[in-house]
Structures are given as C-alpha cells and as structure tokens.
Image (cartoon, rainbow, N blue to C red):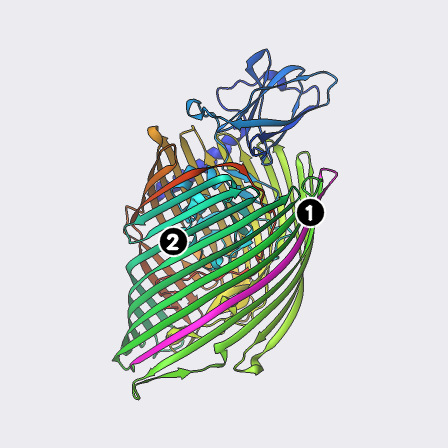
Amino acid sequence: MKKIFLLLFFALTVGSLQLFSQATVPSGNKVSESTATPKNNIIIKGSVIDSLTSETIAFATLRIVEADKPEKIVKLLSTDERGNFQIALNNTGKFLLHIQYVGKSAPATPFEIKPSDKLIDLGQINVKDNLTLEETVVTAVRPLVAVDLDKITYRTQDDPDSKTSNVLDMMRKVPMVTLDAEEKIQLKGSSNFKIYLDGKPSDLISNNPTQILKSMPASTIKSIEVITDPGAKYDAEGVAGIINIMTDKQSMNGYTVNVSAGAATMGAYNAGVNTSVKFGKLGVTASYNYYRYKNPTFDYESFRESYTSDTYKYLTQNGTNAYEGTSQNGYLQLSYEIDTFNLISASINRFGNDNNGKSDLMVDMQNSTYQDIYKYHQQYLRNPKWVGTGFNVDYQKSFRKKDELLTMSYRYNLTSEDMMSETAIDSILNRSRSLQKLDNNADNKEHTAQIDYTTPLAKIHTIEGGVKYIFRLNESNGDQNYYDYHNLEWKHFVTPTDRFKYRYDILAAYLGYSLRLKDYGFKAGLRGEETLIKAEFPLDNDMNFDTDYFTLVPSTAITYKINPLNSLRLGYNMRIQRPGIWYLNPYINNTDPKYITQGNPNLDVEKANNVSLNYSMFSQKVNINANLSYNFTNNSIQRVTTMERDISYTTYENIGKQNQTSLDVYVNWNPSVKLRFYLNGSIGYTDIRSNNETNISNHGFNEQAFLNVQYTFPYDFMLTAMGAIRSPQINLQGETSGMFMTNFGLSKSFLKKKLNISLMAINPFSKYITLETKQWMPDFQAFNKNDFPIRNFRIRVSYQFGEMKKQIQKVRRGISNDDIKAKEEQNQGGTGNIGGGQ
C-alpha cells in the first residue's frame, strides 16, 4: 500500500504540472483564433464587487464573448485576489463580459472597442446573491489557495470538509504545512515557526498546538495563512515562517449561532458554541470550545548502551504509558465603528489545557557481561497544566485616501505552565526505595505597545512604518520534596536554580516599501531591534547576568504575474529566534532519575537566512503551488544529551550549524465539480553539525506527502479518503522513524446545509502506529519505541441558525509578537526524552 501511495503521489504531481499549460482554457470551450496575433494594445480593466457587502470578489471567472456571437469565446480570465482584472485585447467591435461565481449572479456587461481606444475601464461591476442557486448548475469552483507578495492563503471556509473537521485536520491541506505521526505540525519541514490567531501570536497555541487546534472546529475558521517571507512589519523571529489562523468573525446586522458536538471511540468528546451579533455600529463575536481527549494505555520500551563504562553498560526500560486531559478555549471581541474613519475594537481570549499522564516501568541496569547491577519498579504521574490569557485593544484611523491607515495597539498576555509530578521507586535489586514530588511553575507576562502607519503613493507605491515596545518577564519557581522513609516525613530540597527571573526589553522600528506595476510586484523592508536582557537568580545572586544586542533584519520579495493564472515569487529574509522560558528555565527536572533535563539561561539568539522561489498556478480545475527554499543557520538552538556514569543529562545549546534545502508542492485538481484531489508534499535534504569540539553531525533526505480525495454523491453525501506517508526525520543526535496512515470520512448536510453530520474512521487498517527514536553520541547510543493506539472512529454534529445581513468593519492591523522560540512538543505518554520520562 505504501508503494501504491508513493506512485499516486508522483503521478499526480507530474500529471498536474503537465496540465497547467492547458488549464487556462477549460475543455469544450473554443477560443476565438482572432486573439492569436495581437494588433493593438487595448487594455480592458475593472473590478468585481459584492453589491450587498461592498467586498471584492476574488478569483471570479470572467468570459468575454462577441455581442452578436455569444457562443464565440474571445477570452477567459479570472479576477485576482483583490477582485481586480486587467486583460489586453487586439479586437475591435462590441462585446459582452459575463461573470461566473458560486452563489452570485450579474447581467452581462456590454462594452465596445474602437480602433482609437487604448484603455477601457469598466469600473466596479456589482454582483448579487443568486436566490435561485438550487436551480442553477455550478460551472466553476473557487480556488482554495491564493498567493500574495509574502503569503499563501488557504480558504478554509470554501472547503466542504471544514463543516465536519477540526482545525488540526485542515492543517494537513495547507500548502507547505505537514503533520507527523504524533500530529506535530511542521512548516517547510521545520518546527521553528510561529502560530498566530487573527494576526496576533498565541504562545499557548505555539506551545501546545496539537490539543488546542483539535479543540477548535474548522467551521469557525475563515482561512489559514502561511507567511513564508515575513516582511519588516513582523517581529524578527519565526525562522521557517508564520502560520496565521483567521477566525470567522464577520459580525453583521442580525446574528448567527453555530453549535457543535462530537465523540470518538477512544473516549474523546467535544462541544462548542460560536456566535456573532450586530447591533447598529457595535459588533460582538464570542466562542467557547471544550475538548476531552484520552489515549489508552500503550506499550513503551527503551534501550541505552554506554561506550565509556563496562559496569553501567546497558540500561533498559519496559512498561506502559497513558495520558488523558481536557482543553478549553474561549474568545470575546467587541468592535465599534465610531464613524466612517474611526474604528476601535477590544478582545479577550483564554486557553487552558489540563493533562494527566502516568507511566509504569521496569528498569534494569546490566554490566558488559549482562549481569544485573540494579533493578527496580518505577511509577510516575504527571500533571502539566497550561493556561493563557490575552487582552488586546486596537484603534484604527482611516483617511480619505484609499488604504491609508494609522493603527495604535496595546496587548497584554499571560501564559503559565505548571508541571507537577510524582515518582515512586520500589527496589527489586540494589536500589533503595524512594518517593519524590516536583512542582515547577513557569510564567510569561508580556506588555506590548505598537503604532503602525501605511499610505499608498501614486497608486502603485505603498510605504509602511512603525515602532514597537515589548516588556516581557519570564519567571520560574520550583519546589522539590522527598519522602524520608527513615523519619517518616517529607523534606524540602532547595537548589539555586529553583527561583529564576528573565526580563526582556525590546524596542523595534521598521520601514517597508512595496510596488505593484502591471505584472510585477516588489516588496522590501528593514527592521531594527534593540534587546536588553537581565537574568536574576534570587537564591544565588552570583549567578545574575545581563546583556544587550542590536539586530538589523532585512527582507525582500519580487513577484511576476506570468498571466492572470500563473505567477512567480522570489524572496529573501533573515529571521532570529530568542529562546523562550521553556529553553531558558534552569530548573532541574529529574522525574526520571536516569534521564534528567534542564534549560540553559545562557542561550543566545539564533539567526537564520532563507531564500525561496515560489511558483503558483490557479485555474478552475488545477491549482499548483511549488516552493523551493534554502535555509542556513550558524548557531541554532539544539537539544543536547550527554552521559555521566549511568545518568543522561539533556539541555539546550547554540551549537547547531544547519543547512536545509526543500521543495514543497501543493496540488488541487478538480476533474469535475463533484470530484477533488489534494496533494501536499515535500522533499528536503538537511545537513546539520555542531560548531564546537564535539564534532557531532548528521545529514539525510526527508520526504512526506498527504493525499486527499473528495467525492460528492447525490443528496449531498460526501466521501473523503486520505493517506499520509513520512520518511524518517533527522536531528543533530539521531532520527525519528517514518510512518504511514489512512483516514476515511462520510458527511451529509440537512436542513438547507444548516445541519451537518460526519463520520470518520482514523487508520482503520491498523490498531497501533509505532514511533521509534534513535540517538547517538561518541559515548553512548539510545533507542526507544512507543506503540501508540491510533485506530479510532468518531462522529461530529453541528447546527447553525440565525441570519446576517450587513458586515461591520474590523481593525485591519494589530500587534503581532512572533519573537519567541516555541516550546518543543514532547511525547505525551511520559516519555519526552529518549529512553525516559520528562
């Protein structure tokens, strides 16, 4: 089955690339041969506008025919992502312009071309809702992907699966985004990226994306943006780019309410409600989602061999892991349109995750002749909790000049992670009995103020600039308690790293320029950031230190529109990443006494340079996006494990010199209105080595692909089949295994598509998926394996009621802090480190 899947992957990629040259003209339509040899440069331009909302209509299909021969097509084209169109014709005479768009209609627009004409501006062409949509035949499918100067947008709302899936499911379809066997998100094959929610970063989502995004219904999402070439207005951080999740908060006159619920055979269930209400100039959007997840007990085994000790030679751990928990998120936004030029909005959001994990292991240490040195039974419980609260206020001032904006914003964010654990050891051979409790609370408090201004010049130029100040305080407080079996009492143990404060003061300014000239686009910017750092250890002031540094970050992008459906983009940007509290925290985590982890407060900022070439082609039947990129970093933050006697110590260091080349391909093919194929895949080569005396290195190829097929049967039944494959992924000290999985879904809409019911089978052909991790160093090698239960069946029901009629404005810019390296996701069964728990 894997070989068949790979053949389909390559066949669909090659076949779609061959189709693109023919995709501009649908089969069955004969284009007039008179357009083959241009004689005049007569430009026809205009824009398509929704008459109800005054919004532009992107990627509407346009057909130009001769007025007296309407069956004779002169030209086919589509509007761009801004709803504009422009085409050169060499004909004279009378013509009609027809517009096709799902759910919209408009009368034909007549125009005449005379020999003396050079430019004909049709202005704004209004379309309105097609009230007889059920009686019409849909002849065009809106492209799900749009490309701009610095980003790619996946229109989640236009994907039928969004009504029956969660946001994590939709991530698999986004160009350049992939998920591995543990559902960890990667952007262009890298975990170094930031996740935004409505243009503003969410530290909690970045630190625990799998569970948070699972709890969010995709029906509440408008689009998912991949910002591969972040411009000067974005913070300098986010090496691989930014994933921006735009929620559906188009408040209008009236109200809408969407309620949903779901359940799965593994014991998970969810429920949520989302609503938008409009009262005059006041718009209110609110949502709440609850998700309960459970992973049944699964097998775990690990092996470690020491090359430096014959006494403590082989360490094995065998047993079981299990975890479960709850995730909740809520959102409230108020927007008030003071007048035509002034708008203010405020929002508050809160996320929470409460996880419970447990492990039951047999631990055995043997010497070089396989004799037992010690042996014991180990049980431990973990209860990590993540809580995040964000508050934003934005004021927007617009002017009579179109697209001129002044925005002032304030943001407060509080993120807290509380890690509680309990470890009990019962001796079997040569090991004393022990019991310990650890508790560490890590907080991140952040205040941000920002001013942005943008103005167009002479229609084709745009200048933007702004200033920003961030005050960020990271704190860690740890407690270690051990039970004294001799005196039958608990004892508190104190170390200098139990208390830790880390303060950032960041002052930034940027200036950007963009140019749009016919088929060309150009964007460039320069950002400067001054960073002041102060670290304090209240229990040992001798460990205190402070430092500061200034960074200039350039970025540029050039686009060329080959024709209305094909475009190229070349981009360069430099990005930095500051280590977050999870990397800096010096608290010693010895939940598993043989595998100890600790952060490094002396970490430096890492810098990465990225060059990318992007090709995009969008037509009614075939959409292709291919991105070739090269990224190099000389001081990347890497997880490093060393051995001392029979204990491994894991921390983070700036020792990675990494070069990565990757090709990401997205294909969407619609052979008919009822059938759709998706392909999202990548192939890359990584070379990574240490820049210190250890001389560690690793290199290799990595490939991954996601294939999805959708077919709509009569009576609105939709069948979806998905397959995903991933090759082994490398890191500085080892690699993780590849995987293969399949999903199948069936959905049906009722009551004029207000009620949606879906059934999904997740990996029905295999009960478990095996994840193996290998690690090696000059003084040891290690291996671990988890057999995760994956076969699952789930049902989801959603219902929407209410009616909206008029849209309210929203602030178009706000604060975006993407300057912190996100926490590495750990295996959630208590086996975060290779061969041991964290």
Q: Nearer the viewer, residue 158 or 813?
A: 813
The boundaries of the magenta stretch are 433-460
Residue at point 54%, 35% (across, down): 617
Q: Nearer the viewer, residue 307 or 708?
A: 708
Q: Which residue is mark 2?
A: 290
Residue 661: percent from left, percent from top = 54, 51
| In this rendering, position of residue 527 left or right of residue 158 | right
Amino acid carrying mark 2 in the image? Tyr
Mark 2 or 1: in front is 2
Local crowd size for mark 2, using a 10 Å CA cut-off: few (<14), some (14–19), many (≥20): some
- Whether 596 is drawn above or below 87: the answer is below
Q: Residues within 10 Å of mark 1 (few under 14, many from 20)?
A: some
Q: Is residue 558 visible?
A: yes
Label 1 sits on a secondary structure element that is strand
Which is more N-terminal, label 1 or label 2?
A: 2
Q: Examine the residues drawn in magenta and state their main secondary structure.
A: strand
Q: Amino acid at mark 1?
A: Thr
Q: Which residue position holds label 1?
A: 454
Task: Using the image, determine if residue 633 lies above or below residue 707.
Answer: below
Q: Nearer the viewer, residue 3 or 609?
A: 609
Mark pair 2, 1: CA separation: 39 Å
The image quadrant of residue 692 is bottom right
The residue shown at (67%, 41%) is 403
Q: Count how many numbered circles sit on residues in the image.
A: 2
From this view, report whether residue 313 is shown above or below residue 826. below
**Label 2 residue SS:** strand
- Relative vertical location of residue 125 with respect to residue 451 in this rendering, above or below: above
Q: Quadrant of residue 330?
A: bottom left
The C terminus: image quadrant:
bottom left
Q: Quadrant of the N terminus?
A: top left
- Residue 605 position, x and y percent, is 59, 65
Does the rendering let one see residue 649? no
